[in-house]
Image (spheres, rainbow, N blue to C red):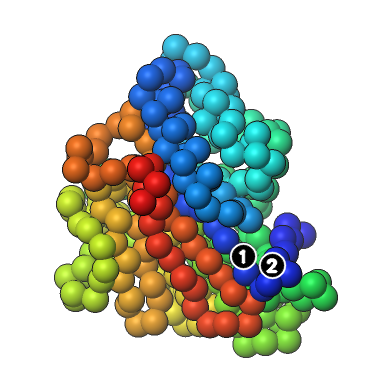
Amino acid sequence: MNRTMKFREDGSFTIIQFTDVHWQEGGELDRQSEAVMRTVLDNESADLVVFTGDLVYPSGKIDPKESLRQAVAEVVKRGLPWAYVFGNHDTERHITRSELIEAAIAEPYCVAERGPVQLTGEGNYVIEIANAREECKAALYFMDSGNVSPLLSVDGYDWIRRDQIDWYEKESRALAERSGVAAVPALAFFHIPLPEYDEVWKAGEFYGTKLEQVCCPKVNSGLFTAMLERGDVMGTFCGHDHVNDYWGNLHGIRLCYGRATGLNTYGRDDFEHGARIIRLQEGQPGFETWLRLGTGE
């Protein structure tokens, strides 16, 4: 059974996307990352906070579960629901994905789920957004984009696998059937960008900044095509590349980077840390999105 949230009385639903926090032991740089999150949270009224991967970067000096607790504390103390997908660094060392997703689920206000155990990865799940009549009017898909390529013949990053794509298509069709529509408007969240993020940049149909290459998988597993054919996903949101924040429209789907949040990792002095804000409006097509920086801008 999918978890359900609700649109506000004014029909809005606002999401804050934090990405690449890279929290370690709660040192000075981590506290600077926390200050970025605090400023964003003070300036935006969120219904849901989404962490799109690399929330923690376990160093071995403290329990990774404690790193996670510290990383989400600013959100938890405000009583805000929060969701989580894995990045490539979250469980690179000292903890497994199954251990960390269980730790996340145990934290207050977490709305993430392990998802079907037979699927590749952990944390493949759906959140429905309903209106006042309990009717599903939008959906949020969360997918584990993995770590590194599982094949010796292919170097680089992992990709969202075929079984995950099949699961998305099945969930999408079932949700549409229950709702009595051809497709329920949706957004999708994962960490590693799809190859189409590079394609939309090269096509020149973008808004925002690109200061590094698109570090996508070298294999295109077909998620974008599946979303295009289903006709429900209006936008996708990723992280991973810390100094890219652009979005582009490719065949009617908006491919969006978040704005890197964490300071305990690489970045640029002239590229302020922050978050992406996403706002849905019940009954209206598409979504609004903008950046909120740690400076308050």
Point out which mark residue 248 bears.
none
Q: Nearer the viewer, residue 50 or 195?
A: 50
Q: Is residue 157 above or below residue 54?
A: below
Q: Is residue 240 above or below residue 57?
A: below
Q: Position of residue 229 (x, y in %)?
A: 47, 82
Residue type highlighted by circle 1: Phe
Q: Is residue 164 left or right of residue 3?
A: left
Determine contact: label 2, label 1, CB under 8 Å: yes
Residue 179 falls in which quadrant of the image?
A: bottom right
Residue 219 is situated, as x and y percent measured from the top left of the image, at 30, 59
The structure residue drawn at horizontal position 65% and vertical position 39%, both measured from the top left corner, is 78
Q: Secondary structure at mark 1?
A: strand
Q: Quadrant of residue 255?
A: bottom left
Return the residue at label 1. 13
Label 2 vs 1, first from the N-terminus? 2
Q: What x and y, as percent, mark residue 17?
A: 48, 52
Disc 2 secondary structure class: loop
The residue depicted at 67 percent of the width and 73 percent of the height is 11
Q: Is residue 240 visible?
A: yes
Can residue 124 be seen in the rendering of this structure?
no
In the image, which disc is placed on residue 7?
2
Q: From the viewer's perspective, tell me whether residue 126 is left or right of residue 86.
A: right
Q: Amino acid at mark 2?
A: Phe
Q: Residue furthest top?
A: 61
Marks 2 and 1, Cα distance to the nearest angstrom?
A: 5 Å
